[in-house]
Image (cartoon, helix red, strand yellow):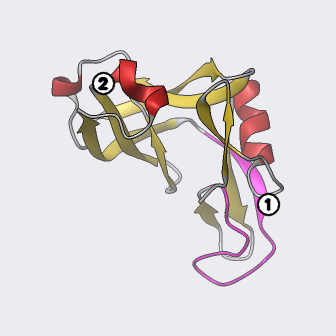
Amino acid sequence: MYDITRIKGWPMPVLNELNQPHFDAMGEGKVLVQHCPDCDTWLAPGAFVCENCGSTAITWRQASGRGEIYSYVVMHRSFDPAFEGLVPYNVCLIELEEGPRLLANVVGIANDRLAVGQPVRAVFETAGEGLPLLKFAPA
């Protein structure tokens, strides 16, 4: 979980050593996630220890940016003032080809057309003061 700050009213993660490389890579149009070289397990950003073997030898590796919708919800009510003009919007759990799961919006498709198992690919947008956002679109 990330600590949150606000930039121009938008909730934004506080960048630190556990997430900065992930956000830096998004600015370059890349999906960077953590990887354990000891057991070859891919991890979602924010890990300080491998969830599989307990190793602390965590590194960063570029992921393909391809995956599928593992689960999703369509929000019909805003739980943050920054999102009031966006409802309804989706929040999807994307399982990357490499294994980690990331929360993101899927864009470029109507919410009623989303489906579990649907192939998606990474796309990038900018929010706040230039903070890159990872989103996904149908593949």
Q: Quadrant of residue 7?
A: top right
Mark sitting earlier along the chain (1/2): 1
Secondary structure of the residue carrying tag 2 is: loop
Q: State which quarter of the image contains the N terminus.
A: bottom right
Q: Residue furthest bottom?
A: 54
Q: In the rendering, at what x and y percent does residue 40 appear?
A: 65, 68
Q: Position of residue 49 (x, y in %)?
A: 70, 75
Q: Tell me which amino acid carries mark 1.
A: Thr
Q: Which residue is mark 1?
A: 59
Q: Is residue 57 magenta?
A: yes
Q: Quadrant of residue 126?
A: top right
How many C-alpha atoms fall within 10 Å of the one at disc 1: few (<14), some, or many (≥20)? Answer: few
Please identify the quadrant where the C terminus is shown.
top left
Residue 49 highlighted magenta (yes or no): yes
**Residues drawn in magenta:** 45-63
Q: Alpha-carbon neighbours of circle 2 within 10 Å: few (<14), some, or many (≥20)?
A: few
Q: Which amino acid type is shown beneath numbered disc 2?
A: Val
Across and down, in percent, residue 106 comes to 38, 28
**Observer-nearest of 40 and 7:** 7
Q: Where is 5 relative to 34, above or below?
A: above
Can you identify the residue that label 2 sits on?
87
Q: CA distance from mark 1 to mark 2?
A: 37 Å
Q: Main secondary structure of the magenta part?
A: loop
| Helix, strand or loop status at disc 1 | strand
